Image (cartoon, coloured by chain):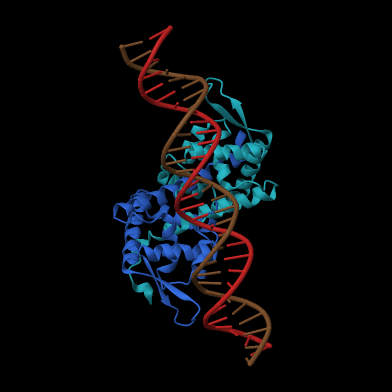
Chain colours: A blue, B cyan, C brown, D red
Amino acid sequence: MCQTLPVRHDLLDLPVLLLGAATALVDGIDARVRARGFTDIRPAHGYAFVRLAPHGATAVELAEHLGVTKQAAGQMADELVRKGYVERRPHPHDARARLLVLTERGWACTRAADEAADEVLRPWADSLGPDRLATVRAALAGLTTPGRIRPTW
Amino acid sequence: MCQTLPVRHDLLDLPVLLLGAATALVDGIDARVRARGFTDIRPAHGYAFVRLAPHGATAVELAEHLGVTKQAAGQMADELVRKGYVERRPHPHDARARLLVLTERGWACTRAADEAADEVLRPWADSLGPDRLATVRAALAGLTTPGRIRPTW
DNA sequence: TCAAGTAGACAATCTGCTTGACCATATAGT
DNA sequence: ACTATATGGTCAAGCAGATTGTCTACTTGA
């Protein structure tokens, strides 16, 4: 009977479920990446790797991807260079810019993260089955807005 | 061209979708809460409100809920008290402790956040329809692990 | 060729959080 | 009842990640 009034009571648990699932995913991947020996990086660095992996990027491009200032991106780049995951190369078309690219260690870490994500998601996906998985995928795609991946707390 | 390489089993786009959806949700709610006049709080405070709303909580309980130290929780409590969202009361059963409870302004903000969440989720839920929404809800519940809601970046 | 825009480095600062120490109160063991 | 230990909270110092502001080197377009 209460259902005839606001249905929003059903909607309010979704934030908790969605954020809880995102947390479980991030923490699960992080734990497995650490278990593979990459103990000096945090999930935030993974977001940087996502942008750097295909063909590298400049500090400004990285900053836009992460949703931070270019100075903050430059500092993260410093850290990743110091830890051996990234190297700075001269930019082929712009002498002002430097191209940030993954080192072999950076690629190894990226592969470890992919394996970790697979380990976390596979049992979940298997229990859902292909049909429901497709439904979930499409539903999440409908809520996602193009742009940042990391919320501002 | 690159598409012929291994697609990594299709599971690797899920982190992006899931985190993107969580980001869109958090940012969407935050923007609408601000539009309702609560401009001096951040999404992180919302997680505190979730714990304080039912019956209040001590600083230590709040710290456990947020996954931070008791000092950090105490500092957030200070801030929320200063801004008028929370007040400290003597704890009924423990003279050491203080019970943190929402003020009327705190409750108003909580209601605003509920409305904001509804606004963000309703069009999405309507476009899914009840069946697929139930599928998504159950799937997310299967991935969520009980505990924190907020990942460590 | 020259003015405006852009990439990035350097410096100072802010904020949220941590660790460590401490006091007041509660609770359990004898 | 008394004492030892555990717990809630606060104070203080410091750190890490981010910010704003400024500067130089290089690019781009009129």
The quarter of the rendered structure image containing the N terminus of chain B is: bottom left
The spot of residue B124 in percent (x, y) is 57, 53
The spot of residue A121 in percent (x, y) is 36, 53
The spot of residue D25 in percent (x, y) is 52, 80
Q: Is residue A77 left or right of residue A37?
A: right
User: How many numbered circles are shown?
Assistant: 0
Looking at this view, is A81 or A142 the one in front? A81
Q: Is residue B153 left or right of residue B6?
A: right
Residue A5 visible, this orientation: no
Furthest residue in direction right, as rendered: B37
Residue A73 visible, this orientation: yes
Looking at this view, is A50 or A86 the one in front? A86
Q: In percent of the image, x 42 and y 57: which residue is there? A: B14
The spot of residue A47 in percent (x, y) is 44, 60
Q: In percent of the image, x 55 and y 53: which residue is there? A: A152
Q: In percent of the image, x 31 and y 68: which residue is there? A: A104
